[in-house]
Amino acid sequence: MQSWVGKHQSSLIASWGPPQQISTDGKGGSVLIYGQYVDFGQSPGQGHIDSYGNFTYTAPKQRGYQRTRMFYVDPNGYIYGWRWKGR
C-alpha cells in the first residue's frame, strides 16, 4: 500500500475501482475507503443429546472478517498516507 503514496487518486481508482465510501480527512482532502469481507465459509450446525435425553441444536455460523483499506488524499488528489484495518 505504501507504493500508492505520491500517486494521484485517479491511478488508484483505475486499478482498484471506485471506493465503497469517501470521507473527509479534516484537512481539505478526502479518505478513499475500500472494504472487503473475507469469507471462510460456514461452520456446520451440530446436534447434541444430553444425559437426560434432551436434544439441542447449535445453528451453523458464518466465519470470516471485515478488512478495510483507507487511502488519505490531499486537496490536489494525491495520496499522502494509508491505513489498514483487519488482517
Image (spheres, helix red, strand yellow):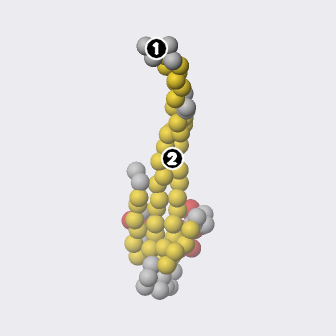
Q: Position of residue 69 (x, y in %)?
A: 46, 62
Query: Do we see residue 49 in this rendering?
Result: yes
Task: Write the residue at 47% across / 59% down.
Answer: 68
Helix, strand or loop at disc 1? loop
Q: Position of residue 78 (x, y in %)?
A: 47, 78
Q: Quadrant of residue 57?
A: top right
Q: Which residue is mark 2?
A: 38
Closer to viewer: mark 2 or mark 1: 1
Ranked by sequence position, the earlier of labels 2 and 1 is 2
Query: Nearest the camera: 3 or 79?
Result: 79
Query: Nearest the camera: 64 or 70?
Result: 64
Query: Do we see residue 11 in this rendering?
Result: no
Measured Cα–Cα span from mark 2 to mark 1:
40 Å
Identity, as a three-letter code, of the amino acid under mark 1: Tyr
Residue 17's mark?
none
Task: Write the residue at 46% across / 14% down.
Answer: 52
Left or right of 20, for residue 27:
left
Q: Which residue is mark 1?
A: 52
Q: Position of residue 29 (x, y in %)?
A: 48, 82
Q: Position of residue 42 (x, y in %)?
A: 54, 34
